[in-house]
């Protein structure tokens, strides 16, 4: 009994799409009763996995569906999550509010297919990052160089930041520029990696060292 389709967000199409289920299977059931068939009102929980394809671009989805029911009476879906592709980004801990606001706006712009605005907000994210880490310099370029020289970021990460700055500059100053979705997506990914590196992983490593007693 394969269902026809369900609605989901396709990151490749960057829009809400219909996905056709091509196969599904049970991931097992559990119940507190030994035999759910013989015991009246025996509740059970179980998971079902669905594989579906986007109706627009044929990208695949893997969906986990949690079920709850009583045999012969009812079965209901209690939870549904897309395991692949990962649509929501990792929570980045320890990011200052001002930086997070800029980054959240970049994410919203991307979801709305506003790619130039997305690149601008990515640039603002790293500019705000520089301000919160007390980077000095007259331009964003100089501030990023200062961060690298001070060891806040290493050379490769600084290079990524310069890349985001360049895409943001293009979106800001080149009126003929028509930024591609891929450019905006890369700018977002590198911004995320940068925030992860400077804020989240740093504080996590400090906690790790503390826990291990150095
Ligand atoms: Zn798609």
Image (cartoon, rainbow, N blue to C red):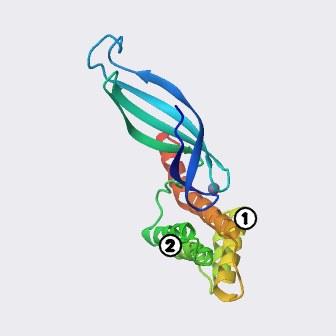
Q: Residue 43, how many percent across, how many down?
A: 31, 23
Residue ID at (68%, 89%): 175
Residue ID at (60%, 48%): 85
Label 2 packing within 10 angstroms: few (<14), some (14-19), many (20+):
many
- Residue beneath label 2, please? 102
Quadrant of the image occupied by residue 2: top right
Residue 100 appears in the rendering:
yes
83, 153: nearer the viewer: 83
Left or right placement of residue 207 versus residue 138 in this view? left
Q: Mark 2 vs mark 1: which is more N-terminal? A: 2
Residue 155 circle label = 1
Label 1 packing within 10 angstroms: few (<14), some (14-19), many (20+):
some
Q: Residue 64, how many percent across, how many down?
A: 50, 38
Residue 142 appears in the rendering:
no
2, 42: nearer the viewer: 2
In three-dimensional space, the C-alpha distance between marks 2 and 1, rounded to whole angstroms, equals 24 Å
Q: Residue 210, how many percent across, how many down?
A: 48, 45
Label 2 C-beta lies within 8 Å of the nearest ligand 1 atom? no
| Mark 2 or 1, closer to the camera | 2
19, 179: nearer the viewer: 19
Left or right placement of residue 40 versus residue 19 in this view? left
**Under tag 1, what secondary structure?**
helix
**Under tag 2, what secondary structure?**
helix
Q: Residue 140, how many percent across, how many down?
A: 63, 81
Where is 36 relative to 211, above or below? Answer: above
Left or right placement of residue 43 versus residue 89 in this view? left
């Amino acid at each position: 009994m394969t269902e026809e389709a369900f609605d989901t967000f396709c990151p490749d199409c960057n829009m809400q799409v219909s996905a056709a289920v091509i196969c599904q299977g049970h991931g097992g059931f559990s119940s507190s009763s030994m035999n759910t068939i013989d015991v009246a009102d025996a509740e059970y929980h179980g998971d079902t996995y669905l594989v579906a394809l986007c109706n627009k671009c044929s990208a695949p989805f893997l969906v986990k569906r949690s079920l709850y029911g009583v045999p012969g009476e009812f079965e209901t879906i209690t939870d549904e999550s897309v395991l692949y592709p990962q649509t929501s980004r990792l929570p980045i801990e320890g990011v200052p509010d001002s930086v997070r606001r800029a980054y959240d706006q970049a994410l919203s712009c991307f979801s709305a297919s506003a790619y130039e605005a997305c690149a601008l907000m990515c640039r603002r994210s790293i500019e705000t990052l520089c301000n919160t880490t007390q980077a000095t310099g007259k331009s964003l370029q100089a501030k990023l160089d200062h961060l690298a020289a001070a060891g806040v970021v290493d050379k490769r990460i600084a290079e990524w930041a310069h890349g985001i700055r360049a895409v943001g500059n293009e979106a800001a100053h080149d009126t003929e520029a028509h930024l591609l979705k891929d450019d905006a997506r890369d700018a977002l990914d590198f911004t995320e990696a940068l925030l992860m590196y400077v804020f989240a992983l740093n504080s996590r490593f400090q906690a790790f060292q503390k826990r291990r007693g150095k």
